[in-house]
Each structure stands twice: as structure tokens, then as C-alpha cells.
Image: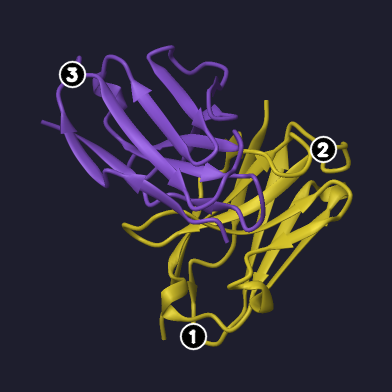
Chain colours: A purple, B yellow
Amino acid sequence: AIRITQSPSSLSASTGDRVTITCRASQGISSYLAWYQQKPGKAPKLLIYAASTLQSGVPSRFSGSGSGTDFTLTISCLQSEDFATYYCQQYNSYPLTFGGGTKVEIK
Amino acid sequence: QITLKESGPTLVKPTQTLTLTCTFSGFSLSTSGVGVGWIRQPPGKALEWLALIYWDDDKRYSPSLKSRLTITKDTSKNQVVLTMTNMDPVDTATYYCAHSSGSYLDAFDIWGQGTMVTVSS
């Protein structure tokens, strides 16, 4: 199975900050990576797929980059509604696997 | 508008079989490229993919749970059913079903609200 290592596991940031979260795959997955946002008690929400394609309706302050084994989610200007936990997921091959999550907290 | 909703027992005893139903609307599981998957999340922990069924009845399972899982679909009822045998307290989690539409191997673009299942005697 492809292992996805996500870092950091948590971070503290202020509104307006630029935030970067990374995922590293244990083997190459081309661009078959998605990013999700999850708020407490809610289901995950798809933000980005194909490593860098913004899902419809997602604010443009979210962006994704990378291919192969190294990927990044960037929030350019953190808003209050962005405090949540973020997960990456590879869909290059079965079994589908998720990163361990990054909790973005208010500083 | 695509929606999915999970249903099933909130409490099961160890060794029992769990049956969860995902009832969806806004799409057909007979349409080429469509899939419905199950993902779970233990309290305070990360997401874990369990199983996925496609429009052509292709089925995929997590290798670590494959012996315990069965996924089926009822296209006429717009439902996908997941059964998990021999439940254990470590299977306590919120179980989600989710839609994918990019043929095989795609992201999950729409998720159900989830259903919490507790395994306890």
C-alpha cells in the first residue's frame, strides 16, 4: 500500500497568514492526489483534486501543487472559516490511502 | 444535486455483523464512471478507506479488512450496502459513504453526513 505522510500534524496560525501543508507519498502517484477539509462533527469536503485543480465553489485562496511524491496545500490568506483539519488522499492505486491529517488552529 | 445518507445501527456488540446502508439521490449507479465508497474515522483519528463499488459492479476492498467486508449495490433503490463481520471495539468509528465520478480511481467529491457506530457489549 502507498503510505502518505502528512506534515505538520498540527499548526497554529493567525487570520491573514499564509499556511502550507505537505504530503509525501511512499512511491510516485503522478498527480492523483486530493485534499479535503474537515470541520468538527462534519464530513470531509473536497477542496482540490488532481493535485492542483480547485473543486467548484472552493475559494481561490486554496491552491495545490506537486506531482510524483511531494505535494503541497497552500492557503494564501487564512480566514476564520479555514480553521479545520485537512487531509490528503492518493487515488493512484488501491488501496486508497489518506494522510494522517493536519489540524489548523487559531494562534 | 447529489446527496448521500448513511443509515444503520448506532450500537453493535462484539462479534456481531454490522450492516450499513447508503441511500443516495442525484445520480445513478448505473451511469458509466460512477462509484460509491465507504470511509471510516475512529474518534479523534484519521480517515480510513474501506471499500468501493462501481457502476459496472467492480468492487474494491481495503486489504486489511477484505475478509470482513462485503459491498453491494441496489441500483433500483439507489442504495449501497456495506456489511462488516466480527465487529470489535476498535471498529468504533463514524462511517461515511461518498460519491466518485471519474471512472476508476478518483477523489470523493460528495460525502454523506456520516453515521457513528459504537461497538460495545
Q: Which mark is residue B14?
A: 1
In this figure, what is the number of numbered marks? Answer: 3
Q: Residue A76 at x, y = what percent?
A: 31, 15
A33 relative to B61 in the view: left or right: left
Task: Say if residue B4 shows up in the picture.
Answer: yes
Q: Residue A87 at x, y = what percent?
A: 42, 42
Of the image marks 2 and 1, the number of the one nearer the N terminus: 1
Spatial separation of the CA atoms under disc 3 and disc 1: 45 Å
Q: Nearer the viewer, mark 3 or mark 1?
A: 3
Residue type for callout 2: Gly
Q: Nearer the viewer, residue B117 or A93?
A: A93
User: Circle 3 sits on which residue?
Assistant: A15
Q: Quadrant of the C terminus of chain A?
A: top left
A53 relative to B120 in the view: left or right: right
The quarter of the displayed image where residue B42 is located:
bottom left
Q: Are marks 2 and 3 on the same chain?
A: no
Which residue is rendered at x = 53% and y = 36% of the image? A34
Q: Tell me the element at label 1.
A: loop
Spatial separation of the CA atoms under disc 2 and disc 1: 37 Å
Q: Chain of mark 3?
A: A
Which residue is rendered at x = 52% and y = 16% of the image? A57
Q: Chain of mark 2?
A: B
Q: Chain of mark 1?
A: B
Q: Tell me the element at label 3.
A: loop
Residue type for callout 3: Thr
User: Does B69 appear above or below A82?
Assistant: below
Mark 1 crowdedness (10 Å alpha carbons): few <14, some 14-19, many ≥20? some
User: Circle 2 sits on which residue?
Assistant: B33
Spatial separation of the CA atoms under disc 2 and disc 3: 40 Å
B44 relative to B71 in the view: left or right: left
Q: Residue B18 at x, y = what percent?
A: 60, 73
